[in-house]
Amino acid sequence: KIVVDVPNKVSEIQPTMWGVFFEDINMGADGGIYAELIKNRSFEFAKPLMGWNIEYPAEAKKEVIVKLRHEGEILVQNRMDKTSANPRYLTVTVNNTQKGELGLSNEGFKGMGFKSGLRYDFSVLARVITGSVKMHIELLNAKKEVIGSTLVTPNTKEWSKIESSFNALASEPKGTFRIWFEGTGVVDLDMISLFPSDTWKGRKGGMRADMIQLLADMKPGFVRFPGGCIVEGFDLNNRYQWKKTLGPIEERQLIMNRWNIEFTHRPAPDYFQTFGLGFFEYFQLCDDIGAAPLPILNCGMACQFNSAEVVPLDQLQPYIDDALDLIEFANGDVSTKWGKTRADMGHPAPFNLTMMGIGNENWGPQYVERLKIFTKAIKAKYPTMKIVNSSGIDPESRIFQHLNTELRAMNADIIDEHYYNKPEWFLKNASRYDSYDRNGSKVFAGEYAAQSVQTVSPNNKNTWQCAMSEAAFMTGLERNAAVVSMASYAPLFAHADGWQWTPDLIWVDNLRSYGTPNYYVQKLYSNNKGTHVLPITESGSTIAGKDSLYAAAAWDKNANEVIIKVVNVSEKAQNHELSLAGVKKLDPKAKTFVMQKDNLNEVNSFENATNVSPAEQDITVDVKKKTINLSLPAKSFIVYR
Ligand code: AHR
């Protein structure tokens, strides 16, 4: 018999318990949630015209094209000495040129998604050097037919922003963008941009609404950003520097993305972080969806999977200043330098930052000595700020275990543990935190995902087996909420045509997005979190693998409901009576959310997006006996409320 001891509130469950981990990997930001459709809008990628093509009449002979190029109709200028953030721009020279004779096209991020009837906002920074040059702006479908157009004519001698909005007349998942130049004259162009108007909250230049909605639906307790390895960078030069991601977008200096690598069979040589999405926007996103912000900062070490580059200890101060200034940026009032910056960007109210991470997957004595310096400085100025420490990626390794012990001895506030492993590992580790000291450092399970094949294999799939094993493991996280204060699956997003890492929680293409079975598991946990852990036992023991069952129970003080989560990973259906011991009064109706598949290899897809997803059902409670019947199909995860 299974018993939930209802009056016995073992510990609180933190509001932050289930959150999300965001990183610009797999085209998560550029080409993902950042809705900009033009790739390399400011010509600052490694090669200035990456993503762009110079267009000539279809019938133009090769020699003509070569000649035109040599005469410099389209020149890339580099004003390096004047601005280091955005040095390049284009000079376009035309001479009695007709529409269709000279143009530029942009391929987008694996194409561009256009929606019929939707407004698109085009903008460009331009200045006229001589004459008059018209720009015919066009959206093209995959057959290169025009499905939307507008016309702009730069008319200022100084740089100014020209904007024009127009509708797409047809839908297209793999569209492109083109400009034809017409007239006689010379113009300079920069920041050529195109956004759909249906962004999240309708913000101009904002985020892709369908992707953010999937996050909002999870009601995450926190958002960890901006990564991941991109915090660390290939080298220190390539690290994420939040101060460079603020202010007008044309002044945000882009860098190569740390995931611009030939890691899998899908290399991404043109993967850059343009920072159209920067720290202000991440904080704003947290605000929008009611999640606590969890920024992670570089600790003075580059990614240890790439290099062993560290900043000398006597030169660590700028890194520490970044941490202190970030707290002021998030929480300081408008009389402070960074508080004013936040207010000037449109958010005078504080962002209520309560925690921050120092380092991502950093280890060794170099990490510990840097972390100590950071911690001392942050706590001296902001004693209540909670600091998340990193303990690495492989819990079975000596490095991980040694560091974990050392951080606990240092009384770390929160220790970030990462594990990418086979489904069996997750089942075996459902009791991982049962023995952790309740009074010691808290745990942030900051990155985890069951791997169907092996870590970072291109063949990994988001199968029901993986999702179910995570659901089983998560009963152990919830049961140990006294120790585990936060957890997040990783990575979050992946573009079907451009990814570096599998599996991932949410898959997208240029127009569509869907949650994997793992997404629905995360969402069920987060939407049915509860406020306090209740003991759930069978014959006095926790339910963590015996008879292939895993279970956790919680009380939600706001809804005054008991929430029970049970995972049956066996091949057989099981029936159990569950007794709600000590409960005074019960509603005869209960609700269940059932995820079940006989075939462990089932997945979701664009075509069948909710193939593996919860079904809601009502069940009755025996109010006299104070029991419910747990009818657990084989290979199922059920939430009872
Ligand atoms: O989630 C993908 C990567 O896995 C993260 O960037 C890194 O922290 C980990 O190694």
Image (cartoon, rainbow, N blue to C red):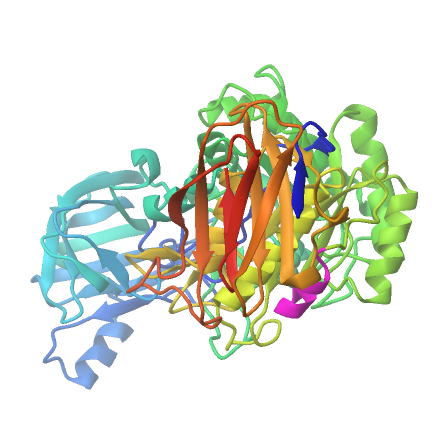
Considering depth in this image, is 345 or 42 the residue closer to the camera?
345
Number of numbered discs visible in the structure rendering: 0
Residue 91, placed above or below residue 459: above
Which residue sits furthest front? 624
Magenta residues, start to end: 420-430
- Is 603 rendered above or below residue 81? below
- Which quadrant of the view contains residue 236? bottom right
* Residue 245 shown left or right of residue 196 in the figure: right
Residue 357 position, x and y percent, is 70, 42
Q: Nearer the viewer, residue 40 or 397?
A: 397
Residue 627 forms part of the magenta stretch: no
Residue at x 63% of width, y 29% of height: 353
Which residue occupies the extreme top position in the image? 335
Ligand 1 - quadrant of the structure image: bottom right
Residue 488: x, y in percent? 60, 49
**Is residue 197 or residue 528 the one in the foreground?**
528
**Can I make out residue 123 in this image?**
yes
Answer whether residue 297 is visible to the viewer in this image. no
Q: Is residue 1 left or right of residue 149?
A: right
Q: Residue 432, image x and y in percent? A: 76, 55
Residue at 69%, 50% in the rendered image:
476
Q: Nearer the viewer, residue 344 or 84?
A: 344
Q: Position of residue 424 (x, y in %)?
A: 66, 69
Q: Residue at x 62, y 30 (%)?
A: 531
Q: Quadrant of residue 88?
A: bottom left
Q: Is residue 277 left or right of residue 176?
A: right
Q: Please tell me in which quadrant of the rendered image residue 618 appears.
A: top left
